[in-house]
Image (cartoon, rainbow, N blue to C red):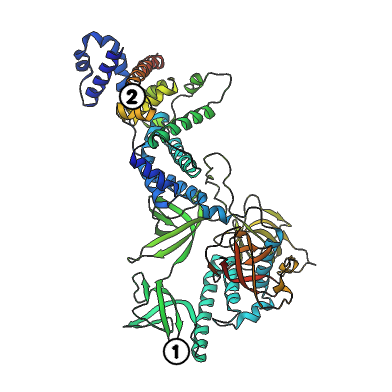
Amino acid sequence: MSRIHDALESCLADLRGGADLEACLGMVPDLAEQLRPALEAALAAMALSVEEPPAAAANRSRSLLLARARSLSPQARQRRPPIHLPRFAMAGLAAVLAVFLGGGGLLVASAAALPGDPLYGLKRTAEDVRLRLASSSARAELERQFNDRRTGEIQALFSLGRVTPVSFEGIVASQADNLWLVGSLPVHLSPETQLEGFITLGRTVEVSGLTQAGGEIHALAIWLRGFELTGIVEEIDETDWIIEGVDVVVPGNTPVDPGVVPGARVVAQLRVDDEGDYIARSITLLGPLPPTATPVPTPDGTEEPEDEQEETEFEGQVESITGSVWVVSGVQVMISGQTRIEGDPAIGDAVRVEGVLQPGGGVLADRIRRLGEDETPEPEPTEVASPSTTESPDQEDQEEGERVDFEGDVESISAGLWVVDGQAVIVTGQTEIQGGPEVGERVRVRAIRAADGNLVAERIEAHD
Amino acid sequence: MRQEERGELDSLRALDPQAVSAVHARYFPELFRYARYRLGDPTTAEDIASEALVRLLEAVAAGRGPTSSLRGWLLGTTSNLIIDSIRRRYARPEERLSESMTADGPTPHDRAEGSEEIYAVRAAMRRLTMDQQHVLALRFGSGYSLEETAAILKKRPNAIKALQFRALAALRRAMEGEVG
């Protein structure tokens, strides 16, 4: 039989080269009768043309694979707590949010803090939390307010003659040699100043530097401001996306959440490149998919493990209802098919919202309940199992604003909240984390105790 | 395993995004074409090609994965996923697989290709054994040489020649059945 197999292979090569079927069969007349059916079938099999995969398909597939790689990385696994965070930890965060939303005493106490003051980190934490919970429309106004605050702080430092690390953002108003004006602040550039991006007049930049006694800032680094874009993905064409009408370049190595398809609502972290194009640093799926979108299952058919979710609850007044997005006391609240809405709340009603914080801001509501007339529509701190329930010599005198140092084992790490030796420690953007501590490792913690007993970390350092 | 494939696996094991992207860029088109040839449906082909790559990543990250041929492992996994997909789609215990598979008529994609003949060939192809479909897809869909196909299937070239001959003869008979 091997001769006919060889003859078939030879004829296939000829057919691929453009030869005629009869000519091929003529080369092996004694086998022609046996070969003809196979070669006719081969011609039919060749006719089933297969084109290259569409670019969008390749892009979707690559995003899926990269997302799976991220979830498999040791860092991603370590970010997941081994068990669900204890309720007190969730409640602790909710309490802090409630305090800040309600303008608690700690916020007042820290309001006058300047960069370098003990309470300054807490002041910035309060701002971060407010920004995180604000609706997109309110967020821009808050950012403007907070940036004005930065300018005021820096001017206060000038008047006090303090040399202090600061950071702020503003529009480049002038660029005279080594002295720029950013916003209303003079910024001195030195050969050591790191510049990122092609910075020209009128561009918004972020500045990191040191205040000088002479009333200017010695710039350590200046970079084009990155920003968030929240909206609907309108189009995906390989690396060229349109999000909420904005052209965004999404390089192949950009982390993109699985399930991000045209029609999905996302938060894109963007930067501006030298040519003024918006380049995505990450694309995060925000809230529930629109009804037309289909969630992407994991390859093994199981549900994708949920990212850590931070539960929260608060009370406030319904300010607007737009489709599945409500605004309750300035907080954007998203409604899904699973949200329980009780009491038929309307605009102006006081409600209690229970849900989970979303990575891009706002709350995905589990439940919204209209409050009765005898219930006070004000934010209230959730009951907190304070860290004082655990033994720590530094906790005996719990004074607001007190600096607390302790050592312990990291029990869990989640976004914004670590548990060290049973104590919930709030980690903010200002927290300095040294040595890359991981779950199970011993760390030294330096924190400020908030009024309600929560610890806000200034520094967490891996223990040698 | 070829040195190049070993390097790809090493970089994949590190879960480095650039390495993952590079492996994807290299193999996704091949896997898509293979699955598209077997199934006709580009959407399912995309899903299956993606899933094969995800399974590779998971296997490599878990310390398993290909030991002899990366491409062979991927195409074998893709073939198995296609079989699973077809079984799920046509899971009717009272019927034989091949009967139910050809009972649905042309898919929208077959119709979009504008030819009933192409539908007939695809339907006939589905009547072959999975091994036969596999070898025809590799030779005629993906365009691998005899030697490449032998390496992917971990068989000797002569065995591939024989399998190919039987597959084509069976396809011809199935096509007559489709036409008739």
The residues bearing labels 2 and 1 have C-alpha atoms spaced at a distance of: 80 Å
- Residue at (51, 80) in percent of width and height: A150
Residue that badge 2 annotates: A45
Residue A296, percent from left and from top: 52, 44
- Residue at (41, 56) in percent of width and height: A242
On screen, residue A178 above or below A132? below
Residue A276 found in image quarter: bottom left
Question: Mark 1 is on which residue type?
Answer: Gly
Task: Label 2: state its secondary structure.
Answer: helix
Marking on residue A341 = none
Residue that badge 1 annotates: A215
Residue B30, percent from left and from top: 36, 37
Q: Same chain for the residues at labels 2 and 1, yes or no? A: yes
Task: Label 1: state its secondary structure.
Answer: loop
Question: Mark 2 is on which residue type?
Answer: Ala
Extreme-front residue of the structure: A464
- Between disc 2 and disc 1, whose residue precedes? 2
